[in-house]
């Protein structure tokens, strides 16, 4: 995905979210998930760099689970070399797993608020990030 296309997609999502928010009030137990997968080599390099910077800032070498809250559950399975897996939970009642098979995978699963559920599986050189927000 080109930078302009990615920017346009992000802007469209932001506009749609802002436009629909007054029409659909938040209810207890809701959540929203945004998954990002790079569409070009440049986007993949940028995403890997961002995940790498997050890892460096948090002292992560290959994988990490961080939980700040109550009642969270997380798992990280890595089979292969050169994988980077991050499961980061802020808030209560999250459930998240990340499974990486093969070499050279990189993914960050970031959960915020409360009560989100996310399960990611990668195989062989994939890159991505998932952001979940629950209320």
Image (spheres, rainbow, N blue to C red):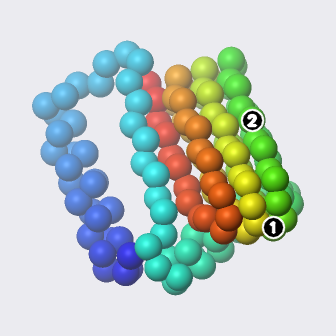
The residue singled out by tag 2 in the image is 75
Q: Quadrant of residue 10?
A: bottom left
Residue drawn at the location 39% of the way across and 37% of the way down:
32
Residue drawn at the location 54% of the way across and 30% of the way down:
117
Viewer can see residue 51? no
Q: Mark 2 or mark 1, which has the lower sequence index?
A: 2
Q: Which mark identifies residue 82?
A: 1
Q: Quadrant of residue 66?
A: top right
For mark 1, does the 10 Å Cα neighbourhood hold few (<14), some (14 to 19), or many (20 or more) residues? some
Front residue of 126 and 52: 126
For mark 2, does the 10 Å Cα neighbourhood hold few (<14), some (14 to 19), or many (20 or more) residues? some
- In the rendered image, the quadrant that contains the C terminus is top left
Front residue of 71 and 78: 78
Relative horizontal placement of residue 58, taking residue 30 as reference (left or right): right
How many badges with numbers are in the image?
Answer: 2
Location of residue 84 with respect to 132 vertically, above or below: below
Location of residue 65 with respect to 85 vertically, above or below: above
- In the rendered image, the quadrant that contains the N terminus is bottom left
Residue farthest bottom in this picture: 42
| Helix, strand or loop status at disc 1 | loop
Location of residue 81 with respect to 99 vertically, above or below: below
Residue drawn at the location 53% of the way across and 23% of the way down:
115
> Residue 16: where, in percent of width, then height?
20, 49
Relative horizontal placement of residue 12, taking residue 4 as reference (left or right): left
| Helix, strand or loop status at disc 2 | strand
Q: Quadrant of residue 62?
A: bottom right
Front residue of 121 and 132: 121
> Residue 31: where, in percent of width, then height?
41, 30
Residue drawn at the location 25% of the way across and 45% of the way down:
17
Relative horizontal placement of residue 118, taking residue 67 as reference (left or right): left
> Residue 63: where, in percent of width, then height?
80, 52
Question: How far apart are the two marked residues, 2 and 1, measured between alpha carbons?
Answer: 18 Å
């Amino acid at each position: 995905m080109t930078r302009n296309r990615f920017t346009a997609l992000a802007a469209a999502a932001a506009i749609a979210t802002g436009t629909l928010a007054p029409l659909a009030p938040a209810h207890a137990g809701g959540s929203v998930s945004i998954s990002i997968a790079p569409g070009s080599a440049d986007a993949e390099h940028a995403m890997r760099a961002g995940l790498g910077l997050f890892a460096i800032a948090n002292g992560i070498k290959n994988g990490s689970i961080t939980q700040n809250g109550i009642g969270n559950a997380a798992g990280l399975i890595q089979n292969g070399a050169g994988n980077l897996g991050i499961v980061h939970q802020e808030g209560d009642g999250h459930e998240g797993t990340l499974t990486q098979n093969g070499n050279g995978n990189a993914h960050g699963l970031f959960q915020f608020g409360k009560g989100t559920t996310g399960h990611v599986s990668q195989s062989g050189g994939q890159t991505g990030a998932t952001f979940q927000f629950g209320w």
